Image (cartoon, grey):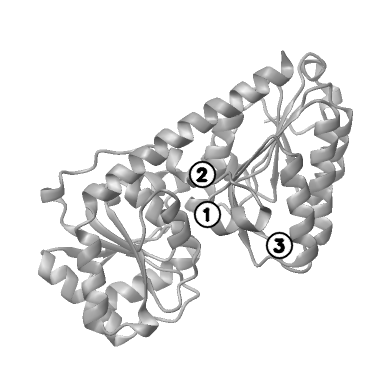
Amino acid sequence: MRTGAAKHSPRAHRSSPTFVSLTGPAGNIGDALIRRGTLDWARDTSDVLVAYVGEAPDAWLEQLGVPADAIVLRSKRSVPRWLWMLATAPRHPVLIFEAGEIPLDRGNEVRELVFLAETAIVRLKGGVVMRPPRGIRAPTALPLWLHRQAARLSQIALWRDAASAAAIGSPSIAPDIGFVAGVRAGRPWADRDELIISLRGARPLPDDAWVQAVRATAAAGGLRIRTVVQVREDEERARELAALLDGEFEPWGDTDALAQEALLRERYDGARLVLSDRMHVLVLAALSGAAPAELVPHPTRKISDAFATIGLTAVSCDASTTDAEGMAAFLRTQLRRGTETAECVREAVERLTALEADVRETIRAARS
């Protein structure tokens, strides 16, 4: 990867660049999943790709598959260079923001003002601004207003849930970009023999009623319980859950992120039910044909709203207001939704494929 400014590369003068933001922690496979999807939409839109990756290590670039000839900008110290490259780019640059959750609580005013300025610069140059499917978190007045103006200036701005779209005043709702990771056939339903769990380490341990419900569901379905790690900080929680449930614990350990992702997808291929409060655990599980379920106290609407976008409703249950039998009934219901899940995922992938085609046509038209 090149790390110098564009003025040192003769190629930068022959093509208007595509700028793409790809920040994220290397220990979160879900974040890598959606950044990789964003990068895939940016590929081949220019022979000059400029990627801002924040503080990410080289392993993150490998995990995403950032091209070796990309101009990579790191750390907040490179933000002025990023802005200068945008301001001095030839006509018709492309700016692609990263997918994911957008915090709009107090303290994000300056960041949103910078993003609005970036958007305005690109549009004034006759370029294209694209915001892939995103979700809004904790909106407050000024950051939301700034974000709304930037979204309206963008040719393509997509939202992964109806609440986020409504906050912006946009009709453009789309599946989470994580669904572009690829549908997998997985094992035949009758041969799937695992109930897989991956929960956030920051939450309290589940209570006895939750443990009873999960045990009963696994026993009734003849399923082995396995706990896995898709975010490094959740590893100890996975160990604790395996002990509580007499399940098998599968650590992340020293495995590199790409190998861990491949292993997890193999595990989801053999699962009937995957239980998590991590959205992209459930996205990958659904892509493998497993039924997704969120069963935690006071779940946020992040997962339920994003899955409702693809037509799969009622994937979440509030464990704080449900007894053991109610939780077990919820899990039994989810276990009967394998075919429904597969159909919703198929339609989501088709929708995202069409959206990528729209993005590429918008860029082509702007540069023609």
Quick check: can you spot residue 246?
no
Quarter of the image with the C terminus in it: top right
Residue 240: percent from left, percent from top: 35, 76
Comparing labels 1 and 3, the label whose residue is closer to the camera = 1
Observer-nearest residue: 201 or 45? Answer: 45
Looking at the image, is mark 2 or mark 1 earlier in the sequence?
1
Give the quarter of the image for residue 35: top right
Residue ID for mark 1: 161
Residue ID for mark 2: 174
Q: Amino acid at mark 3?
A: Leu
Observer-nearest residue: 229 or 88? Answer: 88
Q: Which residue sits at x=81%, y=47%? A: 116
Give the quarter of the image for residue 49: top right
- Of helix, strand and loop, which one carries label 3? loop
Residue 346: percent from left, percent from top: 34, 38
Residue 136: percent from left, percent from top: 62, 58
Residue ID for mark 3: 104
Looking at the image, is mark 1 or mark 3 earlier in the sequence?
3
- Of helix, strand and loop, which one carries label 1? loop
Quick check: can you spot residue 332?
yes
Residue 3: percent from left, percent from top: 75, 34
Cα separation, mark 3 vs mark 2, equals 20 Å
Q: Is residue 298 above or below residue 232?
A: below
Judge left or right: residue 81 versus residue 351: right
Q: Amino acid at mark 1?
A: Asp
Q: Is residue 191 above or below residue 303?
A: above
